[in-house]
Amino acid sequence: MNTLNVGLITNSPRVDRNTLQQTAIAIQAQVDSPEFKLWGASGQVRCFDDIRILLGEGFVPIYIQDDINKPGYDGFHVFNNSPYAYVSSQGVWPHTVSHECLEMMVDRQGNFFLWGPSLIDGQGMVEYLVEICDATPLPVASSVNSIPVSDFYLPSFLTNTPGPYSAQRRLTGPLQLDYGGYICWRKGDLWFRADRFNDGTLYKQQIQMPQINASYRERIDYMTLPHMKQLHARRFKKTFKLKKQKISATERSAHHRHSQWLVKEFKRVAVDEAPATEVSKKKKKPQ
């Protein structure tokens, strides 16, 4: 089993020690879950105040900082002999910490592939780059303390074998991307990518892998922000749209309410207030 111990450390005044500790507890619960063990990965997640102690005890760091020197990104991880990550303290940072931590534990080098059927008809079997949190990027509430964490897909999601397909069951079928999710694969020397937008539109296209001295995972991170800007600019061109999935107004509304509830719940945990209640939308009675 692949073991990687991850230490959380911050110098940001936005991040209080209690929330950082609760985040470590929530992620440890994910790492210890039967679903995560399907990836053959394990490890400890702890908080540290001193980087020297963190490194001395054999942990790899996730730094939570106000400025990660990468505009437009919530976080990213780097592979250089040993992996490490940076996460912005802006927004719902525990979700991003969970995302980076789980992906580092599963793939320490950023070059892990699994074979599966292609999303493009007639392409046959392809190699998917394993990025377990990118297909389902929306936050979910931890089962142990309601801290927002990342869902992650399971091997069955790529290999087209019987489910479940993600730890929190957000993914309902193999290769079925969640809102805002993406996935990358290669066929020989050619690379491809699929993105699903919040309106249900699914785009699939060939991409040019950056020729830089980095892991495949880092190269995808390097190109993601420019790729998304270009994709949004071109998304309404007829030749660019390949498939559109219909999303009902009810489903879209429920997704929006769930996102709002998660943000409220995160704020509650941070200041130890009474629990927020997730409620269904009620129809107004006629006057």
Image: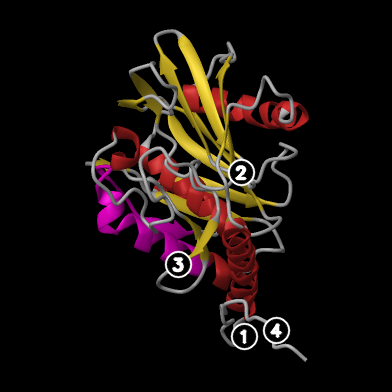
Residue indicated by mark 2 = 75
N-terminal label among 3 and 1: 3
Tag 4 and tag 2, C-beta contact below 8 Å: no
Can residue 87 be seen? yes
Residue range in magenta is 21-47
Classify mark 2: helix, strand or loop.
Answer: strand
Magenta residue check for 26: yes
Q: Is residue 266 above or below residue 27?
A: below
Residue indicated by mark 1 = 273
Residue indicated by mark 3 = 142
Residue drawn 44% across and 55% down? 170
N-terminal label among 3 and 2: 2
Classify mark 1: helix, strand or loop.
Answer: loop
48 left or right of 222? left
N-terminal label among 1 and 4: 1
**Residue most extreme to the front:** 286
Tell me the quarter of the picture where residue 71 sits.
top right
Viewer-nearest residue: 177 or 147: 177
Distance CA(mark 3)–CA(mark 1): 17 Å
Distance CA(mark 4)–CA(mark 3): 32 Å
Point out the frontmost of discs 3 and 2: 3
The amino acid at mark 3 is: Ser
Residue indicated by mark 4 = 284
Magenta residue check for 10: no
Distance CA(mark 1)–CA(mark 4): 29 Å
Tag 1 and tag 2, C-beta contact below 8 Å: no
Tell me the quarter of the picture where residue 46 sits.
bottom left
